[in-house]
Image: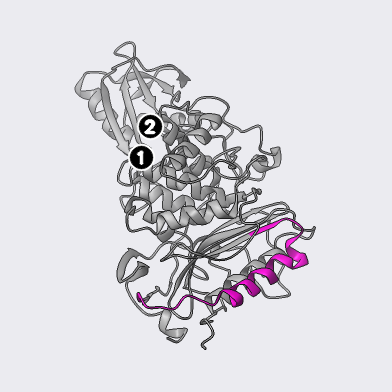
Amino acid sequence: MTRTARVVGSAVLTVVLAAGAYLTADAYDAVPGFVTLAPLSPPPPPFPTAPGAILPTSVPPVLSDLSATAPVPNGDAVSALVSRAVSDKRTGASVGAIVIDQATGAVISQVDAAGPRTPASTAKLLTATAALGVLGSESHFTTSVVRGSTGAEIVLVGGGDLLLAAGPGDPTATNGRAGLADLAADTARALRLSGNTTVRVRLDDRLFTGPAVSPTWQAAYLTNGFVAPVASLEVNVGKLRDEEYPPRQTDPALSAARVFADALAAQGIAIDGTVARAAAAQGAATIASVDSATVHEVVTYALQTSDNTVTEALGRMVAVKSGFAASFDGATKAVLAHLTAVGLDTSSAQLADCSGLGDGSHLSARLLADILLLATNPAHPEYLPVALDLPVAGMSGTLVDRFTTSGARGVVRAKTGSLPNVTSLAGTILDADGRLLVFAMIADQTPPGGQTGPRVVIDGLVDGLAGCGCLAPSG
């Protein structure tokens, strides 16, 4: 099978996850990338995250024609590739790597894969898995308006949707599926029917508990727009402007409530006083509500854009459903508890948060690979998006500008991870012989100089695996 035969003009992305089993998904939005292998390019910023997504004008889809008889690559050849990457001075002194045959689960090569290391954003694989398993792929997050303590008061109640639109909702979008303008129009209609044209607007954002900002985050992460305070409702993830790393609202939930009040006023309802926080009464009647995109779509958004804030909200919703406190501590416990319950070894895993942004998370390359094995296991289709919806090399998400001239383009799906002195990548590879491989590599003591050097090494490993075609020697 030639390399060009693996990238074809088709209306869908297709991946083969088991012998003869073909699964399809629509082509995904791509986001601006940050990495290029051209030697004269400027160094990329420290985080390969993208707070938003744009639809590409042209993304060639992928067809994987893997068969059950595709040969397993030669272990010595794969080990040589892994050893070269691990020993490269650009990846530093602390590196764990593993390559697994997806069909059998057999390890082809590994170097210190069990050692816990700082994962950066590859930690989002854990949260995505738990969100799909606990919440269900087709569930939604509901933002509602309920009756207040008097007929002249209404309460806006956050339900975990951080991707609200300030205006009308867009049924084709993930970010902006539910719109506060629509919620205000429905609320105004109900108020007029009940004879109320003047109301006080209150906000109940108590669904999430504890601090909105993790003590493990550096202050610069907020000022530079890498993350927003985590609240149970936000407009466009708290962004003040649509750009790569915009400033964010310091109180995103209250800001969203004010946007709602303004939209309600535009519908002819007089607003009495200013918006303030107040608890909604138990069993208060719902006046109006809007639903987010599905959990599947939100998970895809988080994986494609590597959005830290949305991932933290997903973790908190896992905690709510699992009976844990919807805080940083409760969310991380809930995520690990689910992974343990489905049979993954989390004994050495530590999560400081659900996004991988904070200091103190430690995961092994083996655990990342095991999550991908779970996601590609036909016995667990509920986790399939964790593998299928990852950025595609050279085509989408945080990999759109990596592997653009590489043989790995279009045949690798992977989650990126970057922090100062940390570079990681974990995903799946369809090699030149049509065999699906699972891989993970974490380097968490990379030398000064930014992300370019270690990414070149890791990308070289992935490119080598994709083009391996290295059959076991005969005779």
Query: In the orientation shown, which residue stands out farthest toward the left?
Result: 193
Q: Which label was assigned to residue 436? A: none
Q: Taking 142 as reference, is 127 above or below it?
A: below
**Amino acid tagged 2:** Lys
Q: What residue is disc 2 on?
A: 321
The quarter holding residue 215 reads top right
Quadrant containing the N terminus is bottom left
Q: Residues within 10 Å of mark 2 (few under 14, many from 20)?
A: some
Q: What residue is disc 1 on?
A: 135
The quarter holding residue 265 reads top left
357 to the left or right of 274: right
Coloring basis for residues: one colour
Query: Can see residue 309?
Result: yes
Query: In the orientation shown, which residue stands out farthest toward the top?
Result: 150
Of mark 1 and mark 2, the one earlier in the sequence is 1
Q: Image point 65% across, 74% down: which residue?
A: 80
Along the viewing direction, whichever of 146 and 342 lies nearer the viewer? 342
Q: Which residues are magenta?
A: 67-96
> Any magenta on residue 200?
no
Q: Taking 18 as reference, is 73 above or below it?
A: below
Position in image of residue 310 (x %, y %): 49, 43
Query: Can see residue 164?
Result: no
The quarter holding residue 378 reads bottom left
Q: Taking 151 as reference, is 124 above or below it?
A: below
The Cα–Cα distance between marks 1 and 2, rounded to whole angstroms, is 7 Å
> Any magenta on residue 86?
yes
